[in-house]
């Protein structure tokens, strides 16, 4: 631009066209990337479910059935990839063409200026090579736009999952499942969650369900709980017993604040949990579900992980961290869960790596490790899920 501004502008006049092509490409490729992501997510879920139950699949000779179910999903992903390839081939080819046009424009206009005596050959070559190098590196950026676009699509999907916009009806009598307005809740308005939330000095563990009603967002036409009133006293063990589908697991998830009731109110120590600080409830409530999650770490680290996010120790005033847990504390928790002897029989004892998901352990052993993990957290409230097929939920 300093040596020959007009020549530089003419040489780089194709750049706006390249930018326009990339904008169009981003608009066209977005829906196709979403189709690809959705198809691969469905396919991976299908494969995970099938491989996890491979013994059952073989026992019923259902390999062909599972394969037939998997193939159409992959074909959807294939079609999405083909459509993406068409868009990228056209846009990349067009961008390459425009970028290489800088050669033509640079030589043509540079020669014209030299013939007219308005520029010397040295300036023309300087401007030409500078513009050519700039266009070459801009061409390399185009390849990275594919990765950036996929990342944007994935982030949009993630934000959709974590966004909390519940739909709530105003009353059971006035609205039926599947026909629920989103601006009110069974007789009282939706509470603004942006206000500062309450953090009590101590948690006693007294729960009260007052006319609680709930349905899952994926099944708004089916009520799971309807006007349930329940009292769970502190410092005691309460069993909730019922048949399959009676709402035991739903009660547990409401206690853990994994869901918000669509009607009624749940209080913890006479405070509505809707107003309680999220971190406060997480620090004082622990759970051991039927499907226990173990990490690809040692036995010691898996048990010590129970202190993650456990808050400040009331005795020392220091925030608890998994790396601060001693071996003695881990062993004490495992003895309480009656799994210490089994751990000592492992090749490396508490330093044995459990592998992905703790697949080397049985279901009962995984549950006992999860109990030890909950014990080392020393929560005020412990929620225990259904164990070994017994139709009991223990809180």
Image (tube, rainbow, N blue to C red):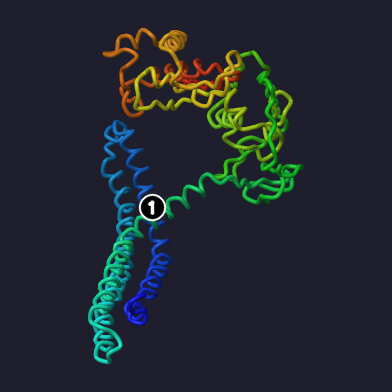
Give the residue at the far right of this rendering: 187
In-image side of 378 versus 268 (left or right): left
| Quarter of the rendering occupied by the C terminus | top right
Q: Residue at x 51, y 48 (%)?
A: 159
The relative height of residue 90 versus residue 112 in the rendered view (above or below) is: above
Task: Give the image quarter of residue 24.
Answer: bottom left
Q: Picture coordinates of residue 79 (x, y %)?
A: 32, 60
Give the residue at the far bottom of this rendering: 116
Task: Give the image quarter of residue 357.
Answer: top left
Q: Picture coordinates of residue 126 (x, y %)?
A: 26, 74
Label 1 Cα crowd, 10 Å radius (few <14 / some 14-19 / many 20+): some
Q: Which element is circle 1 on?
A: helix
Q: Which residue is mark 1?
A: 37
- In terms of depth relative to the viewer, which is nearer, 278 or 317? 317
- In terms of depth relative to the viewer, which is nearer, 185 or 155? 155
The relative height of residue 241 versus residue 30 in the rendered view (above or below) is: above
Task: Give the image quarter of residue 367.
Answer: top left
The relative height of residue 142 versus residue 1 in the rendered view (above or below) is: above
Count up the numbered dots: 1
- In terms of depth relative to the viewer, which is nearer, 373 or 259? 373
Q: Residue at x 67, y 31 (%)?
A: 276
Q: Residue at x 38, y 56 (%)?
A: 148
Q: Residue at x 45, y 50 (%)?
A: 155
Q: Picture coordinates of residue 207 (x, y %)?
A: 68, 24
In-image side of 114 versus 279 (left or right): left
């Amino acid at each position: 631009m300093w040596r020959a501004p007009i020549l530089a502008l003419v040489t780089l006049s194709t750049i706006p066209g390249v930018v326009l092509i990339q904008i169009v490409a981003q608009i066209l490729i977005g829906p196709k990337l979403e189709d690809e992501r959705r198809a691969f997510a469905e396919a991976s879920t299908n494969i995970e479910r099938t491989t996890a139950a491979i013994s059952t699949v073989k026992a019923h000779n259902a390999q062909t059935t599972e394969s037939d179910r998997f193939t159409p999903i992959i074909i959807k992903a294939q079609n999405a990839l083909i459509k993406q390839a068409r868009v990228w081939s056209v846009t990349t080819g067009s961008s390459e063409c425009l970028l290489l046009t800088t050669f033509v424009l640079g030589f043509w206009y540079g020669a014209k200026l030299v013939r007219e005596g308005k520029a010397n050959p040295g300036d023309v070559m300087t401007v030409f090579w500078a513009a050519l190098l700039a266009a070459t590196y801009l061409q390399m950026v185009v390849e990275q736009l594919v990765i950036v676009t996929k990342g944007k699509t994935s982030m949009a999907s993630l934000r959709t999952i974590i966004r909390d916009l519940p739909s709530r009806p105003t009353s059971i009598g006035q609205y039926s499942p599947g026909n629920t307005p989103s601006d009110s809740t069974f007789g009282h308005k939706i509470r603004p969650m942006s206000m500062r939330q309450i953090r009590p000095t101590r948690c006693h563990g007294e729960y009260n369900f007052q006319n609680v009603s709930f349905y899952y967002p994926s099944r708004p036409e089916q009520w799971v709980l309807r006007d349930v009133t329940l009292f769970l006293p502190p410092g005691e063990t309460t069993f909730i017993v019922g048949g399959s589908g009676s709402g035991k697991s739903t009660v547990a998830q409401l206690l853990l604040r994994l869901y918000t009731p669509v009607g009624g109110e749940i209080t913890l120590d006479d405070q509505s949990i809707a107003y309680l600080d999220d971190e406060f409830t997480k620090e004082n409530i622990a759970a051991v579900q039927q499907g226990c999650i173990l990490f690809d770490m040692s036995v010691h680290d898996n048990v010590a992980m129970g202190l993650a996010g456990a808050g400040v120790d009331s005795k020392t005033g220091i925030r608890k961290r998994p790396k601060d847990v001693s071996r003695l504390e881990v062993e004490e928790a495992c003895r309480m869960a009656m799994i210490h002897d089994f751990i000592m029989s492992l090749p490396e004892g508490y330093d044995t790596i459990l592998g992905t998901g703790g697949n080397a352990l049985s279901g009962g052993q995984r549950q006992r490790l999860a109990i030890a993990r909950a014990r080392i957290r020393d929560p005020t409230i412990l929620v225990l899920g259904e164990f070994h097929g017994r139709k009991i939920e223990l809180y």
